[in-house]
Amino acid sequence: MNKQTIVLPILLILAVAALLLCPLFGMKFIPLTAEGLDRSILLDIRLPRVLSAFAAGAMLSLSGMSFQALFRNPLATPFTLGVSSGAALGAALYIRLGLIFSLPLLSGTSVAAFIGALLAVGLVYSMTRIKGGFTTSTLLLAGLAISFFFSSLILLIQYLSGFEHSFRIVQWMMGSLASAGYNQLFNLLPFLLSGSIVLLFLHREMNLLMTGEDLAISRGVHVGRVKRLIFITASLMVGGVVSACGPIGFVGMMAPHICRLLIGADHRRLTPAALLFGGTFLTICDTLARSMPSGAEVPVGIMTALLGGPFFIWLLLNRKSGLEL
């Protein structure tokens, strides 16, 4: 039995263990046999937060994997094409304007953030179509342009905001699961289920895209259609996560790359591995973030950035030394 055949079962066991054990830990350990208030905290606060963390981590990891296949670059992240900036702009406008509205199961901030994410996706897609075709370079440049422009608008909004609004904007942009509950979980699940199914069906096409567009075309792949489908699927998953939790960085870059090292580059196995590893990774990071000995919870986005920064440097140095990724 080779290493690749046992990685998926191991990741599945780790994921189940994380989902069962992480709700027990926090600033106070709560056993499964707890009663009264502790049991309510365990089932109504910690459990949905852990499940939401797993769903968000899985979607970020899958999105990162698909963008890395789309751009044939392991440094690509779910936020490469400006979806995160669009969501952040929507949330910043909502906070700055003092708007108060909500939808069933959705807060006003989440609605505004998702609208901003859709705006970014629509602009990037429209710019790429206007340019002609759906080339990877045009898609990347359009995404970067939208990302920089929206980031500038967010800075302008912060500058024109008072202390309270500016603090709320910065706090939201750190990325946190502190307010995650069953509502957020139910909002994330449709994106996770539909996105996972689409990407699983596209595993052959992503394998061929990684080898080059010319070879993919020669094997019968409709490259333009597949790239559009990957772009829209991954972007919607990212938009769903960011609207619910804020931007949580580096998960989408680290998780699929680590899985690629463990299980290989075949997306038939890489897709479920990325789902399991990404979900488990963010669940553990969030558990650590809310279990600080100081008693103050750290936003999980800070925790992932502290881990992702050194990993990015390591990956960059290895690429520079000529390591094939």
Image (tube, rainbow, N blue to C red):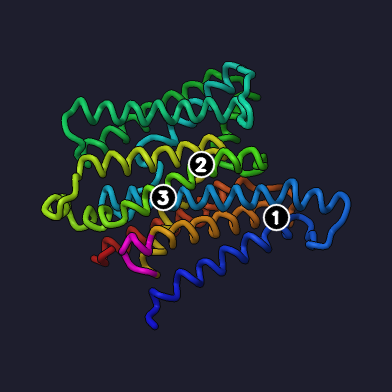
The residue to which callout 2 is attached is 190
Q: Which amino acid type corresponds to the residue marked 3 in the rendered image?
A: Ile
Please say if the residues under marks 3 and 2 sit with CB atoms less than 8 Å apart: no
Residue plotted at (54% across, 27% down): 111
Report helix, strand or loop for mark 2: helix
Q: x and y percent of residue 72 in the render?
A: 25, 53
Which of the numbered marks, if any, corresponds to residue 197? 3
- The residue tagged 1 is 292
Q: In this view, does 137 lie above or below 102?
A: below
3D distance between C-alphas at marks 3 and 1: 37 Å
- Of the numbered discs 1 and 2, the one sitting upstream in the chain is 2
Image position of 203 with respect to 170: above or below: below
Element carrying mark 1:
loop
Q: Quadrant of residue 120?
A: top left
In the picture, the quarter occupied by the C terminus is bottom left
Instruction: Specify whether residue 5 is painted magenta.
Output: no
Q: What residue type is labelled 2?
A: Pro
Q: Is residue 314 above or below residue 250?
A: below
